[in-house]
Image (spheres, grey):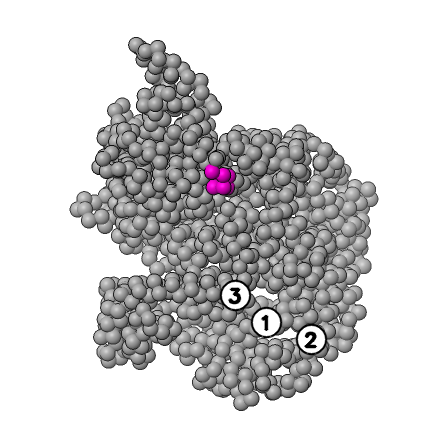
Amino acid sequence: MEFRPQQKLALEFPGNVAISAGAGSGKTRVLVEKYFRLLADEHPDWPVGSVVAITFTVKAASELRSRIAGRIAEELAKPGLSSNRRARLVEMRRDLAGAPIGTIHNYCARLLRDYAVEASLDPDFVIIEGVEESVLRREAVETALAEAAATPKTLAYNDLLLVQLLFTRRQLFEILETMLRRRVEFAPLARRFEETATDDLFAELKSYHAQLLADWRQGFHTTLEPLLTSLEAASKKAGAPDKLLPALQAARACNRPTSDWKGLSDALGVIREVMLTKDGTLRKATAKKLELAEDSPLAGQIVEVFGAKPPLPAEITGFDRENLEISCRLARLFLRVEQLYGQSRDASVAPGNTDHLDFSDLEIRAESVLRESAPVREAVRKGTNMLIIDEFQDTSPLQWEIVRRVVADDSGTLLPSRFFMVGDPKQSIYGFRQAGGRLFDDVRKLVEKSNPAGLGGCRGLVSMNDNFRTKQMPLEFVNGLFAHLMQTAEVSGGGAFEPLNAQRTGSPGGVEIIVTRDNATDTDDESDTTADPTDANVSPQAAAVAERIAKMLGSEKLCGNKDDEDLRAVRPGDIAVLFRKRKHFPLYEAALRARGIAFATHRGQGLYQQPEVLAALAVLRAAAKPRADLPLAEVLRGHLVNMTDDLLFKIALFPGRNLAERCRAATERLAVRAGGQEIVLGPGELERLTFALDLVEGIRKKAGLVAVEELLQSVLNETGLLMIFGATDRGRQVAANMERLLQVARDSHTMSIMDFLDFVDEQAQDPQGEGEASLGFVEADAVKIMTIHAAKGLEFPVVFLPELGDKLWGRTGELVSDGSQWFSTRKSFSLEKDPLFLRDYFSDQENQRSQREEVRVFYVGATRCRDYLCLVLDQQDLSPGTGKRTRPVTADYFRDAAGIVGVPAPGELPLNLKTGNAQQVKVAVTHVVVPSAQMVPTRVPSVNDDHFERQLCVISKAVGAGVAGIAEDGGKENAFQGRPLCFRPQFRGVRAEVSVTQLLDFLECRERFFRRHVVSLPDPIFEGAKSEARRPLVPPSIRGALIHEVLGLQLRQGPDAWQAVVESRLSNVPGLTGTELSSAVDAICAHVTDAVNAGLLAGLTGNGHVELEKPYVGMVEGFALSAIFDAEYQGDDGREIADFKSDEKPSAAVLKRYETQMQLYMWLLSRSVAGQLNFTARLLFTAIKEVKTFTMTRSELDTFGIKVSGWLGELRTFSEQFCHPGIEVDGTLFGAIRDNCRASNLDCRNCGGKGGFN
């Protein structure tokens, strides 16, 4: 096969080369040929090791090496070779096995071993990953936090106290572990923040903000001016909203790059409020008054410009400085974590007395030795005659620094004829690894600059856009769609979109849009198909895909080879279903399984969700945590033991501190009395229970003595797991899954069960933990289920792209950064009520990056197709404006680019893809109707507190007479001896914050406080199993929150602002429809209207100094005591407080609690307002239309503050006793808490205390 002109240009250009290689353009063939020609033809005197080839994955490196070997063999097979050429080819074949062809990490490892002395490393260093790396990271974080918490009055301790005002210990752990995992990005930032004073950082931040704001305003000024002019003309018509014209005039007056930004921002806020709804759509009433057509260009500009949130806050505030302070504290904690992590891998302490390096270390150390050692740099340059790099668009800035120091001189200029790169910026989809951005385009410019004009007109820049993979129709669809979606360099990855040129002949192939519809939608269209409800049980789109694949297989001729001979029928192995997210795998597996269609799932989260894997891991968890109830309960109820609810209930009645002890008691005593009945274990039940306990105990005794792989093998042997799960149509898959799990354990080289389980949990939760598809997976005659990331570099005759309405990725977690100068936490002391520059700006930048990358991911998925492409969408995905999306998803991009409005009818659909071409792309549209009842969720009751037996009595009759006896007994404590299941919750090491609500709960009942705010358990059923009272239409919590929201709207915008809000909010309440919904709406509206008419808001309405939802935080006794005032406003004596209450019949106890709440509010306000002597707080009871007023002087509040200090001191003592790591939450603990509550001076009806709020 001859090379095309652009391929020949890339191979023959004598200087440095940068190739933009489109999907399916034959780039691997060019790479192989370039490598071969360099060593065999152009420079036969070069050592094979002087040509470096860097690939993105191990699989790609293996394929490249294999194809180079094939090219050498092909040349050796030619007759008439000279002896010199044959000898050279034989030499290349011999040295190929050790040639530097591999990933960037492979290259770094080679370099560091060659220059170990200069890098201060043992040349026999070990590369760690997987379990070992995960364990060392966690240990470093745990050690650093423990050190800080154990050393009071140190900087680290103070850092920990401050950051734990914002984050739980678990959140902090995850933040520090994330920083460690991404330390290539965060380590330089942390050092900068540690080395720079906070005030200096704040000054830099102000300058940074000012420059960004000035740059943005310059462009915004040009966009806004003509829009203001058009709107001002329209606003002069009769009936226009009164506030609009003054706001437009104010905006025009401030619309200059140097004018007051806050004034412009305020004016734009008024325009936005008048013109747009909260969802960002045009207000129909306003548009009608302005005689503005909703589909007019002006209407579109209004929505686009005024609906867009400014990328920057108007000004830097004190909250920004406090946020910097938090970042500085985190930076110091992280640097200690990093130090401990490095020490744990040093040769002096690491196993084998050798250095242990992870992949980040390889990059960091390689770049460091090249940067700092001129002799090393020169030696590496001298030994590298050519460096070839594939998939350059996936290269990170640090990886480029390593390569640049090899192929460029110290000034950054590329050395002549030293660099050959291939990539496609349109396929840059690894932004979460810091790859992509403008790097590809920047390096292309370096290549162009390094080549003199005399070398050729292209200056080393080559575009390869001939596509040998995809047939004409799907390729035209891709070209038309992405020419629209990739109009900017930011989206395309650099430069203008270059269409691909179809090279395959014969049949044109096809594109199909599958629309899933709910059967509630009326239709008389005979071309609709209905998915079988037996397989529709998984999800609408999964059912549709399975339905369509079933029709394809064996009956539709859609596939041909690349030589394009006659089409053949579709086989399962021709089809790939590609996803953005792995969470969908189980749904599609179930749908295909129900249809009897063979499938193979590429690795990922799916493995650890399979029932056989969960069953095996459950036994390990139970053995690793012998005193924890939930792991053992999982084993008992799982398929390996299959214990019934009856038996589990019986066991719960036996004595013991935990489930394991109660199980042992059950096997020894065999019977127990409960509720006046004798509960007896039968012979079969005893045998089943004994087997389970012996299984777990046997694994526990071996733990730490043998590898985890052997423990898993023991589970398989002793339980017959493969036989149990293999006796289904999944038999082969079960065996493969367990072999894969054993391989994971084998590769972990660990004997620690917990280390292995932590690693498995981390892998299961990792949203981007992609691996490589093995050759066997690709060649299997089964439908492939995999992510688009994993499919990169592969191709399939038929490709399905479902779930296009998924919310886009974006970096999740508590941290945002720019990767070079700044980072910030998402939380702040502003309680998210006020804007924060770094947080908001970087979050917005990340959202934009995510949206741009989503287009490229869509492109990669679509270009995996060879013959037939299927897009699967829900009917709502094709209806603009449905749902409550805050930003676009892939379905929106497709719908807008294709010009589709509404759901197209089944049949052939010509698409005008807005490319400017007269030719239209024709696609097939298929509708699949899915039963609407398929998505009904199933809720399984979770019983995990000391009223286990009584709660179970209410919901189950599994034990017959025993249950009835307990229910009749009314749940008295002495009715049975059993204790409930217990568990170990996650506690924070330093509990340093409490809200007023939490403090009031603590003062009322310490058990309630512990349940609600420490372990998040429901309140106990103190009165046993009694009949429920009739439930209100709207749950009280929802009702109260809605009334608060509506009152706020009444104060801000008047009565017209909240009527629709009530109906909108209540329509989301489960089970509230029809007349009940109407009644609930009328009741809420009447409630608020009556409260307003009764004058309850008189003191607030018209008060220009009202602040709603005002947060306050006061430090006392080492606690941050926080509250949010419903309203704070200017009164006669200064600032006053109002709090809305919707109680219909508040009791004396409730009123006493409210009085204490108001006292706490006034005390907090007094600490923030200097000079005010008298303080007033009002309770506005909207249901009974009463106002209760409380007043206190500053002197009285100072005295009250002493009482607050005492309460918080009691809370600290309580926390130290009952809120610490390792405590078991069971009936014994709750008994001790009730004793503690009774012993205090509290009037607790639940625990029988005495006293009151004194």
Main SS, magenta region, reads: helix
Query: For mark 1, does the 10 Å Cα neighbourhood hold few (<14), some (14 to 19), or many (20 or more) residues?
Result: many
Q: Choose the circle earlier in sequence order: 3 or 2.
A: 3
Q: CA distance from mark 1 to mark 3?
A: 23 Å
**Residue nearest the observer in this picture, 227 or 1040:** 227
In the displayed orientation, state which residue is furthest to the right.
Answer: 669
Q: Residue at x 52, y 55 (%)?
A: 192
Q: Quadrant of residue 408?
A: top left
Q: Quadrant of residue 1064?
A: bottom left
Residue 19: percent from left, percent from top: 31, 36
Residue receiving disc 3: 199
Disc 3, SS: helix
In the displayed orientation, state which residue is furthest to the front.
Answer: 375
Is-magenta flag for residue 373?
A: yes
Q: Quadrant of residue 82?
A: top left
Residue receiving disc 1: 1113
Q: Amino acid at mark 3?
A: Asp
Q: Amino acid at mark 2?
A: Val
Q: Choose the circle earlier in sequence order: 1 or 3.
A: 3
**Residue nearest the observer in this picture, 1139 or 832:** 832
Quadrant where the C terminus is found in the figure: bottom right
Disc 1, SS: strand
**Which circle, 3 or 2, is nearer the viewer?**
3
Q: Amino acid at mark 1?
A: Val
